[in-house]
Amino acid sequence: MKNLIISLTIITALAFSSCDDFLDKTPYNSVTRNTAITSVKDCQVALNGLYTHFKSTSYYGKNMTVVPDLATDEILAIIGYSNTYGIMYQWTYNASTEEVVNAWAIMYALTANASFLLEEIDKVQGDEATLNNIKGQAYLARAIAHFDLVRLYAKTYNASTAATDLGVPVVTKFEIATPPRKTVAEVYTQIIADAEQALNLITTDQADNVYFTKGAANAFLARVYLTMKDWDNAIKYSTAVINNSKYALCAIDKLSDMFLNDRGNEIIWKVGLTADDASGRQPGYPYYNDSQGKPNPDYMPADKFLDMYDQDADARFFTYFNAVQTRYGWTGYLVTKYPTNPAFAATTNANGSNMAKVFRLAEQYLIRAEAYSEKGGASDADALADLNTLRSKRIEGYTAQTNLTGNALKNAIWEERMKELAYEGQYWFDLKRKGLGFQRATQENAVPGINFDQLKVEPNNYRWQWPIPQSELDANPSIPENNPGY
């Protein structure tokens, strides 16, 4: 990681470059501890730089929203596709694959810059509440980046092996260093510690926010504990969000507006884009792409996923998909969950640009429902109540279920999760944490082949762990070898 950390002095300067006063103090290509952060305003500028990392096309601006789903059976490449993300789709990625290398770089840039802010902020004089709120957001940013890194580049959390499974390096200092990989357990310990600090320090709490809030910290911890199969804590933190009156599941007739205009009280935290920076941040582009008239996308939804929805009454079906004639000459359903925010429509290279809604209230109901169902017994009734609540806000004329228990209930929650969170970058991680593989199904207009519509991935496939980038291995002697199989 030595080369990466050295480069971060420049990355940090660029992240801060939106502040004229700061540029007056410090050359654009060097940041010194004595001058980089000396005021509350500097702290806010540094914090804004962290959010800029989340907006990267290599992170939640695009790839983290798109790549995990197209690397499953949820999506199929269309005959005539441009091979965009083709290596990831075909499961042939290696230590030099662009998406693998860039994700590692941007996430570690974020952890290092968050650590730099946390090291310096206590030296700043100013309003304590404001500084604590900034500090809490920096902790949460660092926690999210470490969580995404360990989910991608290491085995999923397993309580019986986490203390010995290799995780990823933990970066809590801004320094030139060659840190070794920590165990999965150690990484999760750091993640939870940072997230708890965030929860204690952040004072803001409102829906539809581009900044981290207490709700975001609770939602994140619920997701972390679900991954760890710590059902009690998953229930605890998801309940804190669900019981917060600031958040509400959007009504059936408002669902399409939430995804079109990127707004609504169901959104806990979204990656804030403006018309100035929407260019290239296009999670919808590979799925639709009508920039030249009729759509000519690279990928289409798998029929077996379309068939899960009540196509006459489920608002998600009407919002997430549309049957259109393509430039390829055939008519079929395409993913329209990212229909281009009208505020970005005039922006060059913004076709399919919408804000990633990284935390939504719907997910919290699904987390709590899954955790209750895994506890079983009397908790099944609570799980079913959450499932019914979500469905009632998605399906017109829905009749509440009353007799689902045990495995039937677990399967219903799992299917509901697939339907609700489709094309939001969650499904690959869900398969991994559950220890499930997948099998794509042959479909008309899909690219045929063993690595395409016939791809079968077993739960023990080594590529569920992304490879450590070759550039990191070359620069960091503390990581002597890659993940098995690469």
Image (cartoon, helix red, strand yellow):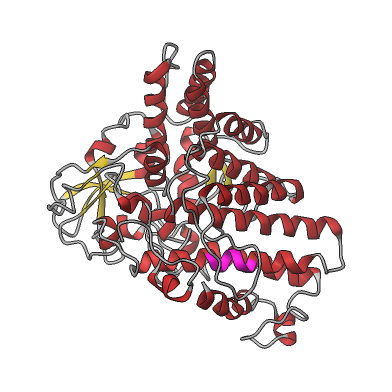
In magenta stretch: residue 126:
no
Query: Considering only vertical position in the picture, is 217 above or below 394?
Result: below
In front here: 398 or 51? 51
Asked if residue 45 lies left or right of residue 476, the reply is right
Tell how many labels: 0
Q: Residue 149, position in %: x, y?
A: 49, 56
Q: Main secondary structure of the magenta part?
A: helix
Residue at image location 47% in from the left, 41% down from the top = 161
Residue at image location 42% in from the left, 75% down from the top = 474
Query: Considering only vertical position in the picture, is 109 above or below 397?
Result: below
Can you see residue 151? yes
Q: Residue 224, position in %: x, y?
A: 55, 42
Asked if residue 61 lies left or right of residue 140, the reply is left
User: Can you say which quadrant of the picture contains the C terminus?
Assistant: bottom left
Q: Residue 49, position in %: x, y?
A: 62, 69
In front here: 120 or 176? 176
In magenta stretch: residue 110:
yes
Q: Residue 457, position in %: x, y?
A: 25, 45
- The residue range painted magenta reads 108-113
Can you see residue 355? no
Q: Quadrant of residue 397?
A: top left
Q: Quadrant of residue 405?
A: top left
**Extreme-top residue of the structure:** 403
